[in-house]
Image (cartoon, grey):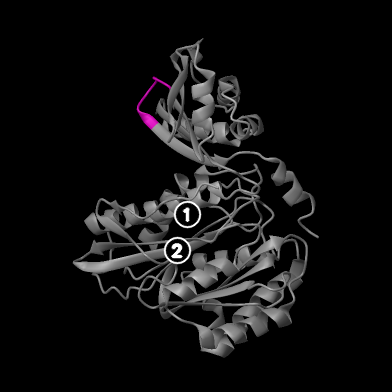
Amino acid sequence: MQQIDSRKEVTGMEVIKGGITAAKGFKAASAAAGIKYQGRTDMAMVMSTAPCTVAGTFTSNVVKAACVQWDMEIVKSGRPMQAVVINSGIANACTGREGFEACEKTAKGVEKALGIPFDTVGVASTGVIGMQLPVDKLVHGVEMMAPALDGSIDAGEAASKAIMTTDTVNKEIAVSFTAGGKTVTLGGMSKGSGMIHPNMCTMLAFLGTDLAIAKDLLQEAVSQVVKDSFNMITVDGDTSTNDTLLCMANGLAENPEITEKNEDYEAFKEALTYVCTTLAKKMAADGEGASKLFEAQVVHARSKEDARTLSRAIVGSNLSKAAIFGCDANFGRFLCAMGYSGADFDQNDVELFFKSANGTLQVFDHGTPLAFDEDKALAIMKADAVTVFVDMHEGEAEATAWGCDLTYDYVKINADYRS
């Protein structure tokens, strides 16, 4: 499976080792609570030593899990958030009043264990829809994790593994940048492998930063960045009931608080974009049953929305995904997906290329199919990451979407997921 390499420097910031515990004041712990899985950790807790300004984005699915509604209320209220408890295995979705009681009792368990007000504790769940959470196990998990909270890289990594369901690899990233003359850190972790077709973010993602920033600007930055990161990935066309992204900022870097869109704000947005895009690509590459990352890059579109729509249609098409799995340079499938996407364009303006680490090959030129070397096409498409590059020649807008191939294993995983 394609692994995303994040170990490189980016203008204005540096990629560093770690994840959710990388920023000052953030600690994490994990526990094996036996909620659904046996023989592995299935709960994680993240907390900050100082209350945090919090921003969030959530699923667009009308059927929202109890935990999503709980977190949405905290974000909307303007209250700080100081901790979040996550469980894997059971989604706490479609669970009625009992589901909300599970959220409250979990949060009150944190209040008792750490002295943090329960209404500043976020909760998140992932797993099977329609099952009730065993609250006693959740509360016991909190009791186990509270004394084990630690700010080490290892603790953050362990937390990122505890929230996995069908994921095959954990997903985390951290960066540092400068704001107001102070070194600021932003770290995060996410999980996501299936039921991914978001209109906000994908599955679960948690970000922690020691930046000092006003709540309205933090929310605006998060809302904007997810449009071209988490909102641009798809695995199977299903939007989860539980999609949650929480970004907590505790201000411990002691930079002058960002209250306007200045250079410090732009530096944060650059870091946030990199972190969210990296986590999104990690999720797309780890799609259920996937063997490769599938990328669609659309350039020179009439509008940004058209570019987003076209690129997402390409990676979202089951026929396109099957072609990527079969290493079949059947470019008509990608053009077909573009045609029904809803974006208006002239096919006679379009150029289409296949790209990978093994080379580049043009197969369509301004409405005309090109004769091409099938062996070269096969070599390109056998790479761990394949890009369909489309030049629309109709404007200046561009966008990139990410997905994965559609394999036999996807059906096997989802045919017996509940059992």
Could one spot residue 81 in this view of the protein?
A: no
The type of residue carrying mark 1 is Leu
Q: Which residues are magenta?
A: 392-397
Q: Quadrant of the C terminus?
A: bottom right
Q: Is residue 69 left or right of residue 359?
A: right
Q: Which mark is residue 188?
A: 2
**Which of disc 1 and disc 2 is earlier in sequence?**
2
Total tally of numbered discs in the picture: 2
Magenta segment main secondary structure: loop
- Image quadrant assignment for residue 314: top right
| Disc 2 and disc 1 in contact, CB within 8 angstroms | yes
Q: Which mark is residue 290?
A: none
Assess disc 2: are there few (<14), some (14-19) or many (≥20) residues with their C-alpha within 10 Å of its C-alpha. many
The residue at the point 56 percent across, 81 percent down is 118
Residue 363 x %, y %: 49, 18
Front one among 394 and 412: 412
Whether 236 is drawn above or below 24: the answer is: above
Front one among 100 and 340: 340
Q: Gap in Å between the C-alphas at discs 2 and 1?
A: 8 Å
Q: Which mark is residue 279?
A: 1
Q: Is residue 105 left or right of residue 205?
A: right
The residue at the point 51 percent across, 65 percent down is 76
The magenta stretch spans residue 338: no
SS for dot 1:
helix
The magenta stretch spans residue 396: yes
Assess disc 1: are there few (<14), some (14-19) or many (≥20) residues with their C-alpha within 10 Å of its C-alpha. many
The residue at the point 33 percent across, 73 percent down is 251
Q: Is residue 223 left or right of residue 268?
A: right
